[in-house]
Image (cartoon, helix red, strand yellow):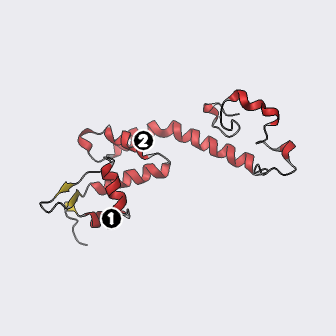
Amino acid sequence: MAHLPVRLTIGQVSERSGIARTTLRFYEERGLIHSERTSGNQRRYHRNTLRRLAFIATAQRVGLSLGQIQDALSTLPDNRTPTVSDWARLSEEWRNELEARIDALQRLRDRLTSCIGCGCLSLKDCHLNNHDDVLASQGPGAPGLKPAREGGL
């Protein structure tokens, strides 16, 4: 197996990470990753960028926005790559948000198995029906589908 060089081209990073070059450029514009420029103005990424990209991909799979990921990465000194302890700290901070998302998805799943809000003849049993707009006092959105911690029913 060939030794991975310390500095990688955008093509090498793309190939190793599975992330499109355009996405890498976008991440760099957003400050999520960093590169250095050669005298010919070509990007060169430190090989630890691969670990940073894995962190970003994992956080996205968890459901975090790029803004949230950027905020998390900005807490690291000198824009360094997250360590195991960094991941443990950051993931603990995201736990409540994940629990709320899981709750919302379970509510959605449980309420939509018998009714999909299509207007059929089962409206008297439908959890999405809001007869006489009685749920207006709960605020905007669908309170029956919101997580409990956000006032969901």
The answer to whether 80 is drawn above or below residue 150 in the figure is: below
Q: Image point 74% across, 31% down: which residue?
A: 135
Q: Position of residue 123 (x, y in %)?
A: 84, 45
Q: Are marks 1 and 2 in contact (CB under 8 Å)?
A: no
Q: Image point 81% across, 44% down: which residue?
A: 126
Q: Quadrant of the C terminus?
A: top right
Quarter of the image for residue 77 reads top left
Say the numbered circle drawn on residue 14. 1
Q: Nearer the viewer, residue 65 or 22?
A: 22
Q: Position of residue 2 (x, y in %)?
A: 23, 71
Say the numbered circle drawn on residue 150. none
**Left or right, residue 122 beside residue 19:** right
Q: Which residue is the site of mark 2?
A: 68
Q: Position of residue 82 (x, y in %)?
A: 32, 46
Quarter of the image for residue 145 reads top right
**Left or right, residue 67 beside residue 29:** right
The amino acid at mark 2 is Gln
Q: Position of residue 83 (x, y in %)?
A: 31, 46
Looking at the image, which residue sits at the far bottom?
A: 1
Give the mark nearer the N terminus: 1 vs 2.
1
Q: Nearer the viewer, residue 98 or 134?
A: 134
Q: Image point 26% across, 43% down: which residue?
A: 79
Q: Which structural element holds mark 1?
A: helix
